[in-house]
Image (spheres, helix red, strand yellow):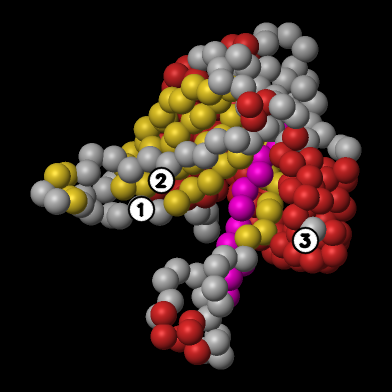
């Protein structure tokens, strides 16, 4: 099955780099959107709430919880923006970067200078295409979680991320950076959003005697109309939502959709345990 799913996902990746794209929705971007004015909002989560939802599904991870929250939040937001014309299970594809480096994290500088210590400079970044599906209000919010975990587990077992890294490296070596950039640009134009999740400090920190109240990260200059970057810090997780404001004029409401999705899943978890 791993070989079969690897073939399917790699084929989809190639088609995405050529011409296959998500259907247009009220949150779709496209070529040129990277130059449009931006607006930012923040969705705030409690890490304990995410852990409670994670414990409701065996072997689930925080990434599974995050992506199920995104799927449920998008569904609620699209219902608000477009009440008609949305088909059940409409696919919205996200782009996530995966570090394929064998030894992640900080390495000893002396080992890296030797060149034969097994450490390499920089990261090896592959791409995963992660779909979420529009769904009208489910009877059990945890259904998003179950469906998401199944999809992500399949992605983890395949060679999609390794293929995307190898493909990018091959194109860069043979055709140069312009073609490689065009390849990445096409993938972004043919998908709907960017997502990342970074683990931050577990305890509160200070710099020069000044307490740090939050840590947030974001990126711009992508042709997506929406990019989301979540970072945890001292028991909280905050997701920066950067949008093209002419496409998504109300990112605060979208952030609220994500926050409510997590609370509904937590409530469903509490009811299941009673």
Residue nearer the viewer, 49 or 158: 158
Q: Of callouts 1 and 2, which one flags the residue occurring earlier in the amino acid sequence?
A: 1
Name the secondary structure under disc 3.
helix
Q: Is residue 49 left or right of residue 234?
A: right
Q: CA distance from mark 1 to mark 3?
A: 32 Å
Contact (CB < 8 A) between labels 1 and 2? yes
Quarter of the picture containing the N terminus is bottom right
Residue 213: image location, x then y, percent: 23, 39
Q: Earlier in the sequence, mark 2 or mark 3?
A: 3
Q: Which residues are magenta?
A: 92-102
Spatial CA span between label 2 and label 3: 31 Å
Q: Which residue is mark 1?
A: 200
Principal secondary structure, stretch drawn in magenta: strand
Is residue 12 visible in the rendered structure shown here?
A: no
Q: Secondary structure at mark 2?
A: strand
- Residue at point 56%, 90% (across, down): 116
Q: Which residue is mark 3?
A: 172
Disc 1 to disc 2, C-alpha distance: 6 Å
Q: Which disc is residue 231 wearing?
A: 2
Quadrant containing the C terminus in the rendered view: top left
Q: Secondary structure at mark 1?
A: loop
Residue 92 rendering spot, x and y as whole percentages: 71, 32
Tell me, yes or no, whether the two marked residues, 1 and 3, touch with CB atoms within 8 Å.
no
Which mark lies nearer to you, 1 or 3?
3
Q: Is residue 234 magenta?
A: no
Q: Position of residue 219 (x, y in %)?
A: 52, 39
Measured from the top left, where is residue 204 in percent x and y? 21, 50
* Residue 273: mark in rendering: none
């Amino acid at each position: 099955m791993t070989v079969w799913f690897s073939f399917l996902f790699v084929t989809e990746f190639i088609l995405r780099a050529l011409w296959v794209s998500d259907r247009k929705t009220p949150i779709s971007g496209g070529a040129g959107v990277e130059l449009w004015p931006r607006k930012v909002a923040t969705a705030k989560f409690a890490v304990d709430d995410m852990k409670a939802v994670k414990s409701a599904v065996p072997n689930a991870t925080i990434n599974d919880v995050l992506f199920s929250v995104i799927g449920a939040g998008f569904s609620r937001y699209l219902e608000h923006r477009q009440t008609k014309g949305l088909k059940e299970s409409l696919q919205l594809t996200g782009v996530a970067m995966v570090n394929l480096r064998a030894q992640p994290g900080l390495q000893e500088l002396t080992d890296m200078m030797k060149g034969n210590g097994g450490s390499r400079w920089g990261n090896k970044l592959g791409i995963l295409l992660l779909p979420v599906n529009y769904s009208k209000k489910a009877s059990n919010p945890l259904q998003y979680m179950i469906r998401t975990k199944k999809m992500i587990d399949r992605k983890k077992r395949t060679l999609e991320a390794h293929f995307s890294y190898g493909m990018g490296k091959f194109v860069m070596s043979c055709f140069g950076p312009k073609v490689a950039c065009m390849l990445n640009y096409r993938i972004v134009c043919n998908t709907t959003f960017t997502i990342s999740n970074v683990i931050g400090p577990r305890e509160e920190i200070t710099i020069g005697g000044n307490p740090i109240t939050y840590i947030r990260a974001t990126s711009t200059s992508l042709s997506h109309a929406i990019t989301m970057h979540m970072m945890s810090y001292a028991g909280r997780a905050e997701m920066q939502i950067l949008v093209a404001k002419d496409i998504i004029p109300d990112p605060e409401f979208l952030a609220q959709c994500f926050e409510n999705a997590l609370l509904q899943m937590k409530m469903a978890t509490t009811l299941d345990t009673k």
